Amino acid sequence: MEPRPTAAPGSFGGGLTITDRLWRIHVRNVARLVEKTMIVAGCNADVVLTDDRTVQRLNFLARGRNKPTNVLTYERPPEIFLAFGTVRREAREAGRAVAAHLTHLLVHGALHLAGHDHHHAGQARRMENAEAKMLARLGVKNPWKNR
């Protein structure tokens, strides 16, 4: 399945909310990174950069899982929530910059909103390929290579 863009090419009409100041400390020009990534992903979702506690609460309410996760997406209204602590921990574990991992997770969330999923092997491969293509356009190394 090819992604269904949710924004006109070259535009980003979504909003950005940053509730955890650590995003601004650890990701240089975070607002520009989000805008550029969402334009490449063709996604107009609102993006909320927040903390683990907030995402844990949302994850419990939406999915019944009482733990933080890296990214949550909501279709109506289209929103992507990212948890700073989890994103930073995963980036460190993978030996990646927080900015690179944030970019990957924004693309991942945008693809979910466009109809992609990764519950089955074939779906996961298609989603990973789409992620890798978008990340290459953004100058971010393929996270699926050499794993």
Image: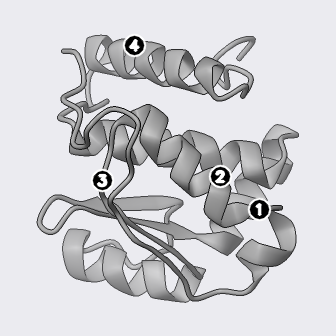
Q: Nearer the viewer, mark 1 or mark 4?
A: 1
Seen from the viewer's position, the closer of residues 12 and 47 is 12
**Residue 77: where, in percent of width, then height?**
16, 68
Is 138 left, or right, of 112 in this rendering?
right
Is 98 left, or right, of 57 in this rendering?
right
Residue annotated with mark 4: 125
Question: Considering only order in the chain, which callout, 4 or 2, is on the residue closer to the N terminus?
Answer: 2
- Assess whether mark 3 and mark 2 are in contact (beta carbons under 8 angstroms): no
Question: Considering only order in the chain, which callout, 4 or 1, is on the residue closer to the N terminus?
Answer: 1
Residue 29 circle label: 1
Amino acid type, mark 2: Leu
Seen from the viewer's position, the closer of residues 21 and 59 is 21
Question: Considering only order in the chain, which callout, 3 or 4, is on the residue closer to the N terminus?
Answer: 3
Seen from the viewer's position, the closer of residues 89 and 136 is 136
- Assess whether mark 1 and mark 2 are in contact (beta carbons under 8 angstroms): yes
Disc 1/disc 4 C-alpha distance (Å): 31 Å
Residue 33 circle label: 2
**Residue 60: where, in percent of width, then height?**
30, 79
Disc 2/disc 4 C-alpha distance (Å): 25 Å
Asked if 33 appears above or below 134 in the picture, the reply is below
Residue annotated with mark 3: 44
- Assess whether mark 4 and mark 2 are in contact (beta carbons under 8 angstroms): no
Question: Considering only order in the chain, which callout, 3 or 2, is on the residue closer to the N terminus?
Answer: 2
* Residue projecting furthest to the front: 10
**Secondary structure beneath disc 4?**
helix
Q: Residues within 10 Å of mark 4 (few under 14, many from 20)?
A: some
**Residue 91: where, in percent of width, then height?**
77, 49
Residue at 74% x, 23% y: name it. 141
Q: Residues within 10 Å of mark 2 (few under 14, many from 20)?
A: some
- Location of residue 37 by image quarter: top right
Asked if 31 appears above or below 93 in the picture, the reply is below
